[in-house]
Image: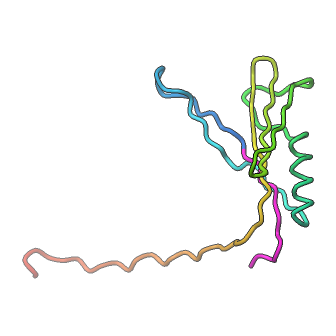
Amino acid sequence: MVADGDWYVLVEEDRNHGSNSSYSPDVHRWQLSREEQATDREAASDLAEELARTHLPRSPSPIKAGHGRRIYRLPDGTLLVRITDGSDQVHFRLTVAELISDVTEAKEPPPAPQSKRRLFGR
């Protein structure tokens, strides 16, 4: 059961999966990489801004000191962060979210074995 007002900051990182041919663009996919719980919505918003300034996403090449960082607030409140380091760039986004359900579904028992049927009903 979820208590009323469980607020989180969700960090999603862009994962570049490369391309399978020289004619198709690189495939990018957002992947949830971090969940940070906060005491309330305002605290989650403050934490999102702090993480926008400090979080270093996983990157194929290490991000060095002195990198550039741009933080954008989108109309829905999501923060989009672009980090540039020389010619490399990575980006991630942070969303303030309220957890409204946390349920673990029970596993279904395996199906019962069926009797073997013989040809022609025998």
Q: Position of residue 39 (x, y in %)?
A: 91, 66
- Residue occupying the point 88% across, 55% down: 45
In the rendered image, residue 31 lying in the magenta stretch gets the answer no
In the rendered image, residue 2 lying in the magenta stretch gets the answer yes
- Residue occupying the point 87% across, 25% down: 67
Query: In the current view of this chain or complex, which residue is farthest to the top?
Result: 87
Q: Position of residue 102 (x, y in %)?
A: 70, 71
- Residue occupying the point 30% across, 79% down: 114
- Residue occupying the point 90% across, 39% down: 53
Q: How are the residues colored?
A: rainbow
Q: Quadrant of residue 99?
A: bottom right
Q: Quadrant of residue 56?
A: top right
Compared to residue 23, the image places residue 38 above or below, namely below
Labels in figure, total? 0
Instruction: Classify residue 74 as left or right of residue 15.
Output: right
Picture quarter with the C terminus: bottom left
Compared to residue 23, the image places residue 95 above or below, namely below
Query: 106 or 32: which is nearer to us?
Result: 32
Q: Position of residue 109 (x, y in %)?
A: 48, 78
Instruction: Classify residue 42 as left or right of residue 57.
Output: right
Query: In the current view of this chain or complex, which residue is farthest to the front?
Result: 75
Compared to residue 108, the image places residue 97 above or below, namely above
Query: In the current view of this chain or complex, which residue is farthest to the left?
Result: 120
Q: Quadrant of residue 2?
A: bottom right
Q: Position of residue 76 (x, y in %)?
A: 74, 52
Compared to residue 108, the image places residue 81 above or below, namely above
Picture quarter with the N terminus: bottom right
Q: Which residues are magenta?
A: 1-12
Instruction: Classify residue 115 as left or right of residue 70.
Output: left
